[in-house]
Image: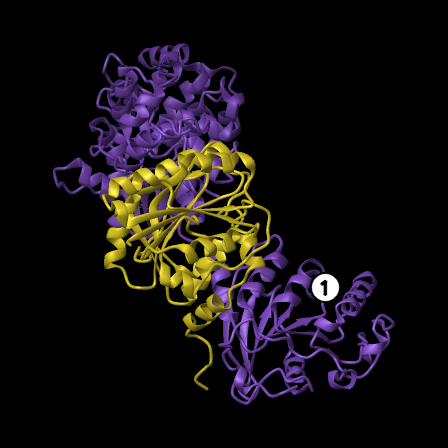
Chain colours: A yellow, B purple
Amino acid sequence: MKVSAIVNCRYEGGLLRPALESALRSIHASGFGCDCEVIVVADRPNNSTLAILDAYGDRVTATLRTDYGDLGAARNEGVAAARGELVLFLDGDDLWSRNWVGAAWAVHLDAPERTILHPQFAQFFGKEPKILVHTDWRDPFFDPRALVARNFWISLCGVRRQALKEFPYPKVQTEPGLGIEDWSWYAEMIGRGFRHVVAPNTVHFIRQKTANSLVEAVKGFDRLPSLAFAEYMAADDASRPYDL
Amino acid sequence: MSNCSSDFVIDFVKKYAFCIDIHSYCAATGQPFESRANALAHYVGAGESAAPELLPSFDAAHYESQLAEGIPPGVSPLRHYVEEGVARGLTPYPLFDAEYVRSQVEHGGFISIFEYLADSRHANIDPHPLFSKNYYRNFNFGAEGAAIDPFWHYIVAGWKERRPTHPFFRYEEYKLHGVTPGDGRAAFNQHLAVALESPNLASGYALFDADCYIESCGDGQHIKAPLQHYLRSGWRLDAAPHPLFDPSHYAIQSRESAGDRRRINPYTEYLSDFSHRHGPNIYFNPDDYRISTDVNAAYKGSLLEHFLKLGAARGARPWRQGAMLKVRPSRRSGFEAVQSVRDAAGVRYWHCVVNADGVLSASIEETSEIEPALTKDTLGHSRLHSHSLPPGAYELSLIAVVGACARCNCLVVSDEILRDELVSRLLESSTPLVSSGRPWLTLMSVSNPNIRYWHKFRRCLRVIDYRPPKENAAAFIAKALVASMPVQLVVHADRFGVELLRNYGTRLLAVCSKVTLFASGVALDPHDSAWLSEFVTTNFAEFHALIDDGDDLQAPRTAGERGRDSFGSPTRLYHPAAIGVAGPKADPGSSEPGSGSLPEP
């Protein structure tokens, strides 16, 4: 199987419907058909969210009920159940552009094994809309060390399933919506040699929350420092007197 | 006085009485003239030797410098100018350009400086390409200067104060072009005349790009003084004075009439308008720019100038969906470079906008079918998320500090730079801070912000300066320490150390494998000392060691005595092994550099 779409949800209620529709539409547009699956991980969902899921029936491949209260752990649960070579994450109130699945797969085929895929743009909508241009590792102005100060990417990424099993998301007990785990995980992955690559002309639509992973990124790193990233930073500095 | 001269005097006084400064002339000549006519008659009769104070707008020497043949004997320069020089387009004042004025007046003939000053129809006509009445009024008087004639003010008083006359002629230009504070009117005018023609005029402002201008003129001609060329005539051809100024875009915003567009240089107009209402090009929105920077509403300059002087270097953004990048972005970046510009420091920037190329709008349109909250307005109202941008100054500083400190063997944080003997005592303390394989300390000072690598035997090896933010340096340092995850952290018990531990101590103790407190006789505020004592006592198990020089810190003596010890009683160097202090915590990772060579505590 080529692609596993993992949709994480909790209290989304009716907002889950457009998220699932966007995933199904993008899969359909890719033309992969049975080579794709949709796994919904409902982590401590409320009734209205469950009602939406019931309505989708077998249009989604599997629905997992978890009791973590933790997005990272819920994602890992989805990965454990996934069969696709490439895992694409979607949060239950966000949306993919129609071309995301096909474009991500195309980039994935040519990318190194340790690659994290991102859409080219994240369009935040709702109150105070914003455009986030995702930085590709190969961009001349990209400095991975800046991850010490901020997150560059939204959490909706694409990663090889095997890599996710080797480097699962950290479990973070935090208020819903903060999503600091992806930022810390991105830092950890850079320390582990992963590269961040953008799929051209793709968009993810992010519903504005009172707080999101990018806004809380700096706080997040304070809470979840990464040893691998610290060592990456140390290795990058040639000025130290290691050669005494 | 002959009849002929008498007629001239009477006629001149009748028309231009306001131009005659009889009081200054009386003072200069020492004669008590009763009327302007008498004074002027004396002035005309004296010829070249007349005291110049009578007519501040008439500089005989400047006028004569334009006459190759000189002035015939017995003819006063004033009369020569009025009767002959005006018709030839000559000028008696450096900042009065007869040709420039003629190009603006409706009848198209030359007029004298006196006619120019006397006729209210010339109120909105600038006397010289480098004298903008709007600029002079706005810069010097603001809203209260509506009733002041800027040019006359300058002739009478402004020149003495070296007031700026134009966006391209300001305080700096006087100094740069030889005007000294003691110059009298004659010497001042001489220097002024030279300065106005200097090819280097206003080169420090970065508001005029000579290369851009010459290229936009298009015919490859050699232009000796491009700025003056532009201000005199080039602007009428819509030649570009700067890559970031688009005359047609400005004209659309300012809604000038076609007549005004022919008469007013739009760039001078823009640079003279301090209301910050208009943008210089389609990608420079004044509101967006002001949101992204701290420009004061009372800033006496254009936002373009603010951007070139300060904003670009600070990462300010003139367009809500734009970014200033020092490197031209690649095609895959999602950005498209729309402008290239150098700021006042000569740093080149690419003004880039989101290269949606229809992708975003098309995606929004097709996704709106399933998510009605996505509308056509979503894209138009969107700002560029700041995380799309390259690291700013704060982040670069954080990167530098973390790069220098990350996973170092032992990081010592101090407010001031530690004296050599203090560093030596740290190195020789019974607490093992260095190992045989890595015998150096990494020393970070905050008030004098630098990071030093201090070798046990070779002493200081390298100094790295960094720039913490002016406000809340403790937060910055705490962030750097948490990200750096040093193997050992030593906090100097000084003013900053107390602040650091007070606000971020719990976090630091949780992240760093070993934390040591180092007291070296720094006098602490009693309140701070008490707090520190309480903090150490409360978190005793988290501290690896306390090192005290015996002056003002007393560490707990035994684990059982926790909570009963205090800071304040002198004691000897603290030895951690004696009290069974908690050993180093296990590192969260397994690949700790240099950990294998650390001696056991």
* Of B464 and B441, the residue lying toward us: B441
Q: Which chain is indicated by disc 1?
A: B
Q: Where on the picture, by quarter, is residue B116?
A: top left
* Location of residue B479 in the rendering, given as x and y in whole percent from the top left corner: 57, 60
* Of A48 and B93, the residue lying toward us: A48
* Of B489 and B393, the residue lying toward us: B489
Query: In the picture, which quadrant includes the C terminus of chain B?
Result: bottom right
Query: In the picture, which quadrant includes the N terminus of chain B?
Result: top left
* Of B132 and A230, the residue lying toward us: A230
Helix, strand or loop at mark 1: helix
Residue assigned mark 1: B498
The answer to whether B567 is drawn above or below residue B183 in the figure is below
* Location of residue B324 in the rendering, given as x and y in whole percent from the top left corner: 36, 46
Is residue A97 at all visible to an observer of this figure?
no
* Location of residue B139 in the rendering, given as x and y in whole percent from the top left corner: 47, 30
Number of residues whose C-alpha sits closer than 10 Å to that of mark 1, classed few (under 14), some (14–19) or many (20 or more): many
Q: Residue at x 23, y 15 (%)?
A: B108
The answer to whether A44 is drawn above or below residue B502 in the figure is above
Q: Amino acid at mark 1?
A: Val
Q: Residue at x 22, y 33 (%)?
A: B239
Is residue B504 at all visible to an observer of this figure?
yes
Q: Residue at x 33, y 37 (%)?
A: B193
Q: Is residue B308 left or right of residue B442?
A: left
